[in-house]
Image (spheres, helix red, strand yellow):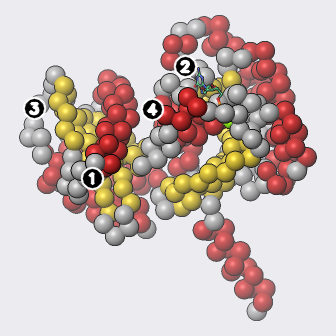
Amino acid sequence: MEESQIFYKKKKESKYGPYKILFTGLDGAGKTSIILTLGRQLSKISKIEPTKGAQRTSFKLLGREISEWDLGGQKSYLISYLKSPSKYFDKTEIAIYVIDVLDDSRIIESISYLYDVINKFKELKINPPLNIFFHKYDPQLMNNLTLKSQIDDVMKEIWETVEYKKLYFFRTSIYDPFALMSTLSKILLELYPKSDLIQKTIEEFAKKLDCDGLIIIDKNSIILGSHFKDDDSKQLLSKTIAYFLTLNDVFVDMNLEEQKDQIIVRKSQNHFLFKPIIFQESKISYYMLILKRRNPFDLYFINKDFPAFVNVFKDIILS
Ligand SMILES: Nc1nc2c(ncn2[C@@H]2O[C@H](COP(=O)(O)OP(=O)(O)OP(=O)(O)O)[C@@H](O)[C@H]2O)c(=O)[nH]1
Ligand SMILES: [Mg+2]
């Protein structure tokens, strides 16, 4: 009897406890900047200080708490994490290892610490997906062939050295926030089985509206789903969404937000429509940005299909 109670308690805990996301890597690699981008706290990045030890922040995604562990990367801290692996690394659900691609003098040191971390995971018998970010790969560097081949070499070296099942590589930059958010969103949504259904529902709705692009994002800028007719439309929406979110924040601060509100912008033949999706009962807000290009349309075209979509969307989110 007692045993089954313990079992039940444990199960419940693991079902509702926060997901632990671990950010690690050398000092100055960009971990805290990435975390701040995630919360749309870009204004804080210019005042950033080296992180002291392990800092935890949390936020909710799809009703479940995500706990972000930002492991400050100064040498003395790195050593202390390795000394107490169960305190820092255990129960990691997703690991993000950040490597600064602009600092090639420290690449070897960085890879060496990565291998130390992987060994600690093995010791702890955990194998969370390990996402390696080749970070500070800023947009203006994308044509730099030397850097590209350097990154490819490092990737190959890691790939051939470690035996680790779930190893993924990304090139990231805080100066391409949409790509960074898309990457982080995909990584985090892997934890949520219902995310596929959410994406499918969003795609169907976009097709029904016959729009050129549609993105649904939550207040932390996690992209829950998107659909684009072509790459051009994707570019237009990805370059504007942060501005719509910021503009909306300003309106909310001015108490100008109402349930039926939307922001409409027309630029040449491009019509952008930004709309909060508010669930009255739970006070959770999501945001939708739609692009319609050709075929001038009634700016309120969305209103007849919107409530039905919100109901379906809400059922999935709250299920
Ligand atoms: N060019 C470029 N600089 C970046 C990028 N991301 C972060 N930085 C800069 O890198 C520096 C270090 O960033 P942090 O986020 O403090 O690095 P950290 O990994 O948290 O460092 P510790 O807390 O010491 O472990 C800051 O000056 C950032 O502005 C990026 O994508 N591109
Ligand atoms: Mg930091």
| Residue 135 left/right relative to 189 | right
Q: Earlier in the sequence, mark 4 or mark 1?
A: 4
Q: Which of marks 2 and 4 is nearer the N terminus?
A: 2
Which circle, 2 or 1, is nearer the viewer?
1
Q: Name the residue under label 1.
A: 255
Residue extending farthest right: 83
Task: Tell me, yes or no, if residue 180 can be seen here.
Answer: yes
Task: Answer above or below: position of 158 versus 123.
Answer: above
Question: Residue 45 placed where, x, y %?
Answer: 56, 32
| Residue 205 left/right relative to 111 | left
Whether disc 1's CB lies below 8 Å from ligand 1 is answered no
As helix, strand or loop, the secondary structure at mark 3 comes to: loop
Q: Mark 3 points at which residue?
A: 296
CA gap between label 2 and label 1 equals 37 Å
Q: Mark 2 points at which residue?
A: 138
Whether disc 2's CB lies below 8 Å from ligand 1 is answered yes
CA gap between label 4 and label 3 equals 27 Å
Q: Earlier in the sequence, mark 4 or mark 3?
A: 4
Amino acid bearing label 1: Asn
CA gap between label 4 and label 1 equals 27 Å
Q: Mark 4 points at which residue?
A: 178
Check disc 3: other Cα within 10 Å, few if <14, some if 14-19, many if 20+: few
Amino acid bearing label 2: Asp
Check disc 2: other Cα within 10 Å, few if <14, some if 14-19, many if 20+: some
Q: Earlier in the sequence, mark 1 or mark 3?
A: 1
Check disc 4: other Cα within 10 Å, few if <14, some if 14-19, many if 20+: many
CA gap between label 2 and label 4 equals 13 Å
Q: Which of marks 2 and 1 is nearer the N terminus?
A: 2
Amino acid bearing label 3: Pro
Which circle, 4 or 3, is nearer the viewer?
4
Which residue is rendered at x = 58% and y = 40% of the image? 35
